[in-house]
Image (tube, helix red, strand yellow):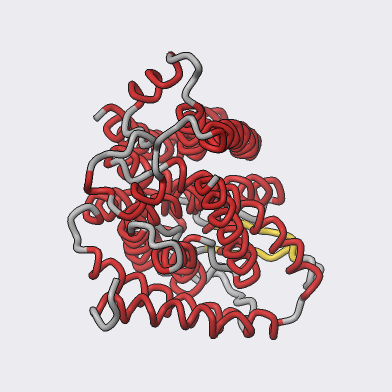
Amino acid sequence: MSRVLWWGGVASVVLMLIGLVGYAVQVGVGSDSFDVTRAVENPQAGRPPGVFTSVPQVLDGLRRWPVDPLAVAAVGLLALLATPVAAVVVAFPLFLSEGDRRYAVISAILAAALIGSLLIGGAS
Amino acid sequence: MEHVAFLVALMATSFGAGIVGAILGLGGGILLVPLLTMVFGINLHYAMGASLVSVIATSSGAAAMYLRTGLSNIRIGLFLAMATVTGALIGAALSGVVPARALELILGLALTYSVVVTLRQLKVDLAEGQPYDPIAMRFGLEGAYFDVRLGREVKYRADRVKAGFAVMWGAGLLSGLLGIGSGAFKVLALEYVMRLPMKVSTATSNFMIGITAAASTAVYFGRGDIHPVIAIPVALGVMLGALVGTTLMGRLRNTTVRALFLPVILYLALSMIARGLGLVGS
């Protein structure tokens, strides 16, 4: 479990860093018109292009060429989100192998609730 | 270049919040939301989304270390996570509907309370005894750890599990509603209500924070409140700051250092309350 948390965290941080540096290079060069400050102050004025709200949108950003750096960063964000969920999922077989059915059921319920919220949040 | 400067400033502020958070034993989240909204003028919902992401990032690293040392109790953590996750999902859904002013007011009050808990933590002693709570017996909410300071093994068992479960539900609700880790409230349930040793409480709370925040973050993500350009520099900054802060903690050992930061935190808390009450323009 500790290994899942550690490596999940490391992998997502690396992805987020790559995405962020890529984005900084992109806007630093001045090729992009996305105005951070405007998006920050007035989010109701419309969804700024940098905000992904679903997994399909993120995948779209990855398929583009050159790859959208913010989509890479979003994959890092999603990986980070999935890390604690993965730790709970890993707990299920661990409890089963210890013969602790009560806690196998508890970890299964938790995993189902977390994956459910991820799916509902990520698909809409 | 203006954007890059913005990113750097955001990261530097988060780095500072991470250091202070680690020294005070609060997560960075509860400090971040007021800083991001008041200093950077970032929309409250984006600030809460960024804070949640940073909470998961710091908790994953720390939880991995605590799990290896055996201080966090996985069974107690998972059992109570059923309460925090349900609370967090409801809180996260509500935070999209509740007016920003009310959220600011609740955040200010939560921050004030956290300061009180931090002050009390400065003089807490190890509680001994083996309570016989029927739920704790049935679900094996007990364990043992080796206390370095005492030089012996300490056995513990949870007490007043029903009340602890209820407080945990509230901690989850606040976490989802305000985009914070609500570690102070989780420690309240573990240490004060269920009477677990402080080290076990802190370590177990850390393990639970990531799970709780993951549930809320999914809801925030679906609503579009996780802005990568804000959330990522903030998360990276807080992580680095927390790392430096924990290293500093080992060297400083001085409780007066903690007391130095408290007025600053109190100021943040009062400003949030004032904004919530509409006393200052937001």
Tell me the quarter of the picture where residue A64 sits.
Answer: top left
Residue A59 percent coordinates (x, y):
40, 19
Which image quarter is the N terminus of chain B in? Answer: top right
The count of marks equals 0
- For the C terminus of chain B, the quadrant is bottom left
* Residue nearer the viewer, B276 or B217: B276
Question: Which x, y percent locates residue B175?
Answer: 37, 58
Q: Is residue B239 left or right of residue B92?
A: right
Question: Where in the figure is residue B130, as x and y percent of width and height?
Answer: 56, 69
Q: Is residue B258 left or right of residue B37?
A: right
The residue shown at (50%, 17%) is A66
Front-most of residues B151 and B198: B198
Q: Position of residue B234 (x, y in %)?
A: 53, 51
Determine the image quadrant of residue A120: top left
Q: Residue at x 64, y 64 (%)?
A: B19
Q: Is residue A16 visible?
A: no
Residue at screen point 30% across, 42% down:
B219
Please say whether residue A60 is visible from this viewpoint: yes
Residue B74 versus residue B42 in the image, above or below? above
Q: Is residue B177 above or below residue A12?
A: below
Residue sitting at x 28%, y 76%: B281
